[in-house]
Structure formats: C-alpha cells, structure tokens
Image: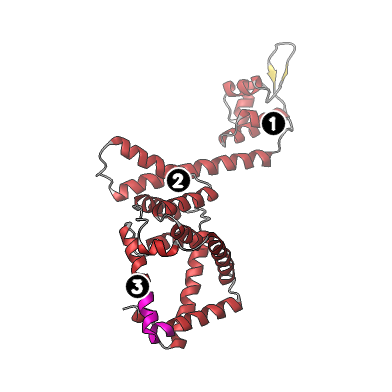
Amino acid sequence: MNIKEASQRTGLTKKAIKYYESEGLICPEKNPENNYREFDKEDIIKLNLIGALRNLDISTKNIKNVIDGVKTIPEVMKEKLEKIQSEITNLENTKSVVQNFLEKEFCDYKNIEEVGCSINKLNKSLELSIEDKKEYIGKSIMRTFPGSFGKMFVANYGAFLDIYIDSEEKRKTWLDMVEFLDNLEEAEEGHPFIKMIDTMGQEALDEFIKAKNEFVKNVLAKDENTIKELKESNVNFLKSLRDDKNFRDNYMDNLKKGADLMNSVGGNGNQFDLYLEKLNDDYRKFREIARGILSDAEKEAGTNLSELLI
C-alpha cells in the first residue's frame, strides 16, 4: 500500500510517517519502478505502535529502542510512569505552596524579596528527602533550644522524624510546621529549665536516646512487658502526684518552667505534637496507645491527671 493508504489505516499524517521513517523507526520498501514507498503489514503494525506511544508522550528515541529490541515496552512504560509521578509531585508541591500563601493571606510582607525567599524556602522544604527532613527539624529545634535541652527534645522525637509526605494534607501540614519552626525565637541559654537539663552529660544523653528508641519500638509493637511497666509507672506517678505534696510541687514547678520556655519562644501549647501526629502515623499510634495506658492507670489509681494539675 502507498503512503496515503498507510495514513488512512493508522490515522497518522503523511508528514508524520515520513518523519518516523527519517528517524529510522520504519523502513518501507520502495517500488523500483516509480520509487514510491510500499508499506506492508509489519509497517502498519509499527506505525500503530509508534502512534500509540507518541500519544503517551514517549520519545521517538525510546520508541526506536523498543523497535530495535534495546528496551521492552514495560521498561519504557515504567520510565514514563516514574517521570509522570515526578511531574505530579512537583505540581502538587507547587499547588500546596500557592494554597498556603492564599489561605494565610500573606499581605503583610514588606517587599517582594521577602515573599520570594518565603516561597523558595517552602518549596525547597517539600523537595527534601526523608533524611533531609529529619535533619531540618533537628537543626530547627537545636537553633531554638540550645544545648542539652535541644538534644533531649530531638532525642525524644527522633524515632518519629522520618517523615514521608504522601498526601495533600501532609504537604499542607509540613508547610505549617516549617513556618512554625522557622518563626520560633531562640530561647535564652540562661533559662533555668535549660540550665537544669544542661547538667546531663553526653553519656547519659546517649543512654536516654538508646532507651527511648527501644521504648518506642516496644510500645508500637504493644510488647506486653513494656505496656505493663508503663501502666505501673503511670499508676505510681499519679499516686505520687495525689499523695505527695512535695513531689507534686516539684513536678508543677518543672512543668511551669517548661511551659514558660515554650511560651518564651513563641510556642503554641503542643502544636508541634499536633503537626507530628498528622505527618507520622507511627507517632499518632504511639500517642493513642499512651493515652489508652494513661486512662487505664487513672482508673486503677482512682484519680485523674488533669484534675491533679489544676
């Protein structure tokens, strides 16, 4: 069949067919009498495949690789899928940053440069790897809470800082957390609570981190012994708060120092916990389990934590 018939059979323009020939994707025989192209059944099959793959925006180079046997169709499709997913992620990230600005109505920025820096920071933060996100949060906390207090803070949350953003809600929450951390003012090194924690040596801190990670793993696994020990610990703690005035006064004093510290750096209650619960399912599960254990301990101790802290 001639090129006109090939065009009708495949839906491709004659110009497109000639282009694919020039790229070496097809090699129709030529009639020696008139030098016209003669397309056979195999050429039509190839042209239909080429047209279908081009509709998926697969490059002519990759199509040639398929035809030449260098790559399989599944391999080419997988590469295309990965590229599409990357483009979707970039678009979703951009959408989240735009929505973040629109929802918060950032009309109080003083100049264009400040707006540009904020957009770049938010956008780049979404592109961070899981390890980079962990490092970013850790550095932000250490900037806010210098010394051993910051190390303790990071260690306490360390098992939950491997954040993978896989939904629109998590992207929005991550941007809110970035702003929250970025807007925290540095705490004063002379704060009594920081000075108290600073007395902890590195060896003790390393032991705390090791024990914390093991504890988190056991709680999430609902290890029977760990759950039992945690409940007993909560029961004893609640009874001490209720029955020992000195213990209660010391605890309330430390609690107030911690609250004062968070307030002094612009903290908003347990906002960080709320963000982290949304960003890390393990942290949400951990907190749910801990709340359940505390509830059981309150029943056994015959008292309520919130009432004791009034």
- In the depicted structure, whether residue 264 falls above or below residue 81: below
Q: Is residue 274 visible?
A: no
* Magenta-drawn segment: 239-251
| Residue 65 badge | 1
Residue 250 location (% of width, % of height): 37, 76
Q: How many marks?
A: 3
- Cα separation, mark 1 vs mark 2, equals 37 Å
For marks 2 and 3, the one nearer the N-term is 2
Instruction: Read off the residue under disc 2.
Output: 125
Residue 172 location (% of width, % of height): 40, 52
Task: Please state which amino acid type lies under the numbered disc 1.
Answer: Asn
For marks 1 and 2, the one nearer the N-term is 1
Magenta: main secondary structure: helix
Residue 249 location (% of width, % of height): 35, 78
Element assignment for label 2: helix
Q: Nearer the viewer, mark 2 or mark 3?
A: 3
Q: Is residue 79 visible?
A: yes
Answer whether residue 250 is magenta in the image: yes
Instruction: Read off the residue under disc 3.
Output: 253
Task: Please state which amino acid type lies under the numbered disc 3.
Answer: Asp
Task: Please state which amino acid type lies under the numbered disc 2.
Answer: Ser
Q: Nearer the viewer, mark 1 or mark 2?
A: 2
Quadrant of the image for the C terminus? bottom left
* Label 1 CA crowd tier, 10 Å (few <14, some 14–19, many 20+): some
Quarter where residue 83 is shown: top right
